Amino acid sequence: MTLAKSLAGGVPMGAVLIDQKFGELGKSTHGSTFGGNPLACAAAIAAIEYMQDYQLADRAAEMGEYFMDKLRPLAEREKTVVREVRGRGLIIGLELKQKVVPYLRALMERGVLALPAGPNVLRLLPPLVIERDQIDFAAAQIEAVLTQ
């Protein structure tokens, strides 16, 4: 398995994980121009410890469910552009019945940054440390934009 991005809390770093069932392969080394960077390794250790100390995986599951509970009713409304709300943890997608770009622009004007995932999916990737009041704000803005 390959890992990157949040592994070192924003400092560029990647890693490869190899299961022990692959025997000697898991004990070998791989040379790289950027391999073994002490700063990136220290940042990764600090980021991993923070994620463990603050149980960010559990928190992401809890806050993601809270966020999706606020958004799911949008798909059930009679006059809505939302076809489906889905996600895992704080990775959330709202599948729309129309192209997403105009809605992304409208959300940006209201202080909510979101990304597309294909032509008609509004993708939300809030930080793992997001608070409920921030979710409430974002959900209210999303509701306002998607139910106009």
Image (cartoon, helix red, strand yellow):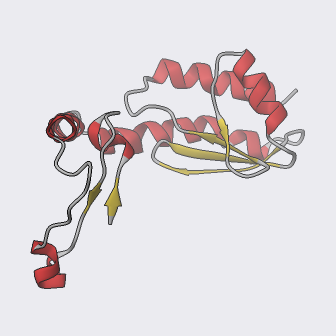
Between 124 and 131, the one lying in front of the other is: 124
The image quarter containing residue 130 is top left
Between 13 and 82, the one lying in front of the other is: 13
Q: Is residue 134 above or below residue 96?
A: above
Residue at the location (17% across, 42% down)?
41
Between 32 and 54, the one lying in front of the other is: 32
53 relative position to 84: left or right: left
Q: Quadrant of the N terminus?
A: bottom left
Residue at the location (35% across, 49% down)?
4
Residue at the location (23% across, 36% down)?
47
Q: Residue furthest front?
A: 33
Q: Quadrant of the C terminus?
A: top right
132 relative position to 34: left or right: right
Percent of width and height locating residue 135:
53, 26
87 relative position to 119: left or right: left
The image quarter containing residue 71 is top right
Percent of width and height locating residue 24:
11, 82
Q: Is residue 114 above or below residue 72?
A: above
Residue at the location (16% across, 79% down)?
25
Between 33 and 120, the one lying in front of the other is: 33
Percent of width and height locating residue 78:
88, 42
How many marks the image carries: the answer is: 0
Percent of width and height locating residue 133:
50, 18
